[in-house]
Every structure is written in structure tokens, then in C-alpha cells.
Amino acid sequence: MRLSGPPPSIAFLSTYPPTSCGLATFTAALRVAVAQSRGSDEGLGVLSLVDQKDGRTKPEVVYEHVNGDCVSSSRAIEVLNSFDVAFIQHEYGIYGGPDGSEVVDLMSSLEIPAVVTLHTVLSRPSRSQRSILEKVVALAQRTIVMSQTARRRLVNGYAVDPAKVGVVPHGARASLAGPSLANKARPVVLTWGLIGPGKGLETAIDAFAGLQDLRPLPRYVILGKTHPKVQAAQGDAYLEGLATRAHDLGLDGVVEFDGRYLDADALAVTVRQADVVLLPYESTEQVTSGVLVEALAAGKPIIATAFPHAVELLSSGAGIVVRHGDATASTAALRTVLTNQAAAARMAVQARRIGSTMLWPAIGRRYDDMAAELVGRNDAHQGRSAATRYEKVVDALARVG
């Protein structure tokens, strides 16, 4: 549905760059995709969640909400209500309060429709986590999950209204969909993202110890900087431990650590240069993986542990799913993809077919249409015209600015 008047203004509530995390990257990409959908970024403002202000905000950030600060919460609610609709990202760890309970306080005071995107749906939540998520869904007009697995888990395991819950895939940059840039001199296996415990990198490194007979030797590139919270607690100790593990296994010429956190354009090129993507995550709960979607968009054969999103998306042949923590199984899967060119090519074709349905331009249009539909209903309910709504938004944004 498209409104006859100006498009609705949208507040994006989430972490946001320069914060380095998946939700920040997702929100920045979603905002750009919506702007491209409507041909303008006018009326698209970000309320950034921070633990403390550091003055590095981007122009589109209209307010920084400091988690746990009551005065900041009041101001954040005022700013949110100056828009027509709120797009809210939910992950327990990005909001203040126990299990991120502050999100409920913020949403309870909203006077505008809210669309909540859930990045985590736990199969075995604590009582507090279950209560918070059920309240978040109840307070939202629409709840978006990014996989069918997540929808089933939410609808079957939580007290929520199924009619509110829809599936919109995680987006991927269109630049990932270009031709492969792999040079074939030495095959490159790539893992990327913030580095820390739980990513399964120990098992991944162990897997390459069983591939030293291959010629040419593969390169295993681990791309990304240490997670800020791990860095704060341990410094470089975790990364140094991984390097020591690789050295002790005789993998100095195989395992490479690239400590950069690349911007989206540079990352797209790096992914397209890889031959294989390895996702060795330890989590059995992960129902959304932006890295998985990006690898599919790039048309790369994928080897992943059996986390739910990987099981769902790789079941048709775009990759190989292996048991968690099983280095031997990972070795066998890597050997198959690295030595069987026909099998790797079939996986790549299937990956690109799936990934082509998940590019950000199409995802942005779906979110923008959702906003228009909700605001159109809200306008009709309140008996106001689009022009009246627009005047209200312009005035409110001028005060925010």
C-alpha cells in the first residue's frame, strides 16, 4: 500500500554505526534501502542506543538514547512519537535493564505504530526473557522475524498473536551479487564478523589440520576485529590464543587473521574474492544470520554448523551442514568443496538463486510498504489527512533538530 500524500516518517530504534555490531549494520542498511525505495531519505531518523555518548553521531541520528538513563528515556519517547511509525530492532543485549527490559518501557509510551524486528528467538528462554518478548510482540502492531524457523519457534513457544508475526528475510547488499572475484591461485575459505568465544573458531582452525595434504594449500582467512566486550575484558588474549592454536597445529601458512572491520563496500569485494564461506558457530539457537544471507547473495558454497537458520537455508543444496564442534566433519566437508569442482559449482548456483531473493532493495520496499499501510490505517482511525500528518512531522522534526 502506498499513501497518496508524502511517505510516512520513520524512526529507527537500534544500535547504529559507528557501533560495531550486527544490529547496527542491519539498521544502517535498512534505512538506506527504505530511502532508495522512496527516492529520498527525508523523514528517516535514527534513535541510536548507546551506553554513553561519544559525539561520533552520523547526520541521520536525531537522538542518542543512553541505556538506563531515565531522563534520556523520556526524551527518546518524545522523539519517537514525533515520527509516524517506529522500526524497532530487538535483541536482549542492546537495551538497558535486566534482559533489556527497558525496551518494554519505551514501547509502552509509544503513540505511533511500531514494527519490531526480532533478531533472537530463544527456544529455552528464562522466565524474564519470555515475559519481555511476549510484551514486545503485544505492544507492536507488526512483528518481523527473518526465518520460518524463527516464526515457528515464536508462535509455538510463546503466548503471542500469530496474525501479528510475519517473515521478511535479512537483507544483503546488491553489490554482493556480482560475479565471483576468486582468483583460484590458492582457494580462500572465509569467516567474518566480530571475533569472540562462541564463534566456533577453535573447531574451524582444528579442521584445517586435516587438509595439509591438499595442493595448493587452502588459505583460511578469519576477518574481523575482536568483539568490543571481549576486548574490554581480555584485551588481545583471545585472539592470541587462536593464533597460538594455529601455530601449534602447524598452520602458520594456512590460517590468517585480518583484524579489520570493513565497511560494506570493502566487505562485499572480500566476500566475492572467497571460494568458500565457513560458519562454524557454536550456537544452536541462531535463527537469523546476516553473514549467512550475505554468503548466499555472493553465490558462495557454504559450510555451516547446524544452527537453525543454516539448516533452513542450506537444505536445498547451497552448502553442507555439519555437527557443532565436530572438526572431523568440518574437515570432510571442506575437502569435498575444495576438491570437487562440480559439487562446489552446484552449491554456488543454488546459493545465488536463494540469495537473489534477499537483496536489500526488495527488502526495503517491503518494510516501506508496511510503514505506509500502518500509517494509512492510523490516519483513517484518527480522521486526519496526509497533509496534516506531514505538517505535524515537519514541525516535530524541526524541534528535534
Image (cartoon, helix red, strand yellow):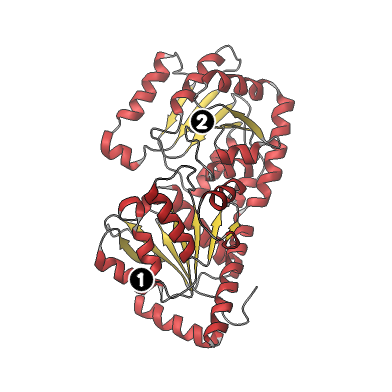
Tag 1 secondary structure: helix
Q: Earlier in the sequence, mark 1 or mark 2?
A: 1
Q: Which residue is pictured at 54% across the width and 79% down the height?
A: 378
Front residue of 347 and 217 = 347
216 relative to 82, above or below: above
Front residue of 73 and 263 = 73
Total marks in image: 2
Task: Check disc 1 and give the amino acid type.
Answer: Ile
Residue 350: percent from left, percent from top: 71, 39
Residue 286: percent from left, percent from top: 51, 41
Left or right of residue 136, residue 33 in this image: right
| Residue projecting furthest to the top | 213
Residue 217: percent from left, percent from top: 56, 18
Q: Is residue 41 visible?
A: yes
Left or right of residue 234, residue 82 in this image: right
The residue where tag 1 is placed is 77
Q: Which residue is pictured at 60% across the width and 25% down the height?
A: 187
In the picture, the disc for residue 280 is 2
Residue 319: percent from left, percent from top: 65, 33
Please state which of the two labelled residues, at mark 1 or mark 2, is closer to the viewer. Answer: 1
Quadrant where the C terminus sits is bottom left
Task: Check disc 2 and give the amino acid type.
Answer: Pro
Tag 2 secondary structure: loop
10 relative to 232, above or below: below
How crowded is the residue under tag 2: few (<14 C-alpha within 10 Å), some, or many (20+)? Answer: many
Distance from disc 1 to disc 2, alpha carbons, whole Å, reads 40 Å
Proximity of marks 1 and 2: CB atoms separated by less than 8 Å: no
Q: Which residue is pictured at 55% across the width and 71% down the height?
A: 40
